[in-house]
Amino acid sequence: MDWLFKLRGEIPSQYRIVLEVVGVGILLLVWYFLSYGENPIVSKLTLPSPGSVFLSYGEMISDNALVKNTFRSIGLNLGGYIKALLWTLPLGFIIGLYPVFRGMFHRTIDAIRFVPLAACTVLFIVWYGTSIPMKVNFLAFGIFIFLLPIVIQRIWEVKDVYLKTVYTIGANDWQTIRSVYIPSVMSKLIDDIRILTAISWTYIVVAETINSEEGGLGALTYVFRRQSQTDKLFGILILFILIGIIQDKLFVRLDRELFPHKYQIKDAHKHGQMEKATMWDTILDFAFKAFIWTTLGVYVVLAINEFFPFLGGIKVIDYLFGDACWAFHVLMLCIIFYKGRKFYLAKQKKDSIIIKKADAANISG
């Protein structure tokens, strides 16, 4: 057990979960101790007890439409990211790759990062009103000004050895962009987006306090803060943490799915082999695949219901996501396209192997 207090020591995999559970348990015990009793150490108005926070969820579900408001915020988050990526990726590659555009706009982009986003809310209200389009564009702009310089930086981090290799085999500019720049930049950018998701929830809270009648978790925090309902406010904050953890895990699985080369063993004798999966990784992988296919199945049913209502006349997707439902549709259609393309390529590869084996058998015969 010397590793427990070793400087920058590695935590053995079998102890990692145990230590995480112990850490959370200590925080909960401290929280319980500070808020225990009729006259707690910290006032209940300042720090509600864990029990009251847990019980507040039932009231929020029944009286404050917690489920619907959660999906409204998730839809807003998705919409902001989709728009931000549609702005960022083309502009980032153009500015990062071509000196003429880099010379004109690179310093301007660096300067825009210092604009306090909260101060821009009035401008977005003037441009887009106070409804969902304003909130989506406000969030997209907040993500855009942080992500654009990162895309440019990632382009410059592409290793010269890859560029020299494709130039040696005669690749033109477009082939170089498609086969080197895009894969290299996107494999790193997904980690940057994963980190940025935590910041994006701050912008969502700011946006949803405007015209709070439209709902969302940010709108609920605004209402509970004004009504001094601290237990419910703590409940929403914990919900933000849970959503963030789930988002983070989904990004990790997505990264492993899209860029498996990042998880290969960095060893000359085992080059190209994947890191050995633990039992926990296997369980999570199965759970992730089951979740994706279940979600796709449910989505297909709900999407049909949007056009031909058969679930009691309720359009579930529209009810949950409101005016940001388009973002959920875009996400699900992208997943369906990716799964369909992956299945098609796998089938093509399998057919090619069968044909080669048949040709080899005919030649030998």
Image: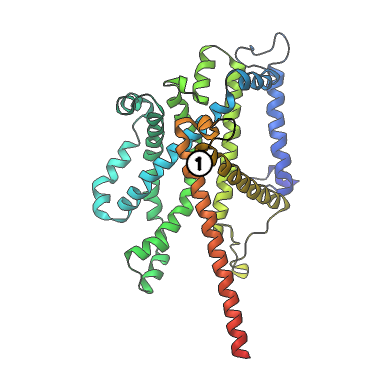
Q: Is residue 317 visible?
A: yes
- Outermost residue to the right: 1
Q: Is residue 290 left or right of residue 349?
A: right
- The residue sitting at 54% across, 26% down in the picture is 69
Q: Nearer the viewer, residue 244 or 361?
A: 361
Q: What residue does disc 1 label?
A: 195
Of helix, strand and loop, which one carries label 1?
helix
Who's the residue at 57% across and 48% down the image? Answer: 252
Question: Residue 272, position in %: x, y?
Answer: 59, 66
**From the viewer's perspective, is 136 left or right of 343?**
left
Q: Is residue 70 above or below residue 3?
A: above
- Residue at 68% over, 16% down: 35
Task: Give whichever of 284, 213 is nearer the camera.
Answer: 213
Q: Is residue 113 left or right of residue 331?
A: left
Q: Position of residue 302 (x, y in %)?
A: 56, 39
Task: Tell me which residue sits at (47%, 26%) in the image.
Answer: 205
Q: Residue furthest top?
A: 39
Quadrant of the image containing the C terminus: bottom right
Q: Classify residue 38 as left or right of residue 325.
A: right
Q: Residue 135's x, y, as percent? A: 40, 29
The quarter holding residue 37 reads top right
Local packing at callout 1 (Cα closer than 10 Å; few below 14, some 14-19, many 20+) is few
Evaluate whether residue 200 shows in this view.
no
- Given the image, on which type of amino acid does mark 1 rest? Ile
Name the residue nearer the viewer: 290 or 8: 290
Is 18 placed above or below 215 here?
A: below
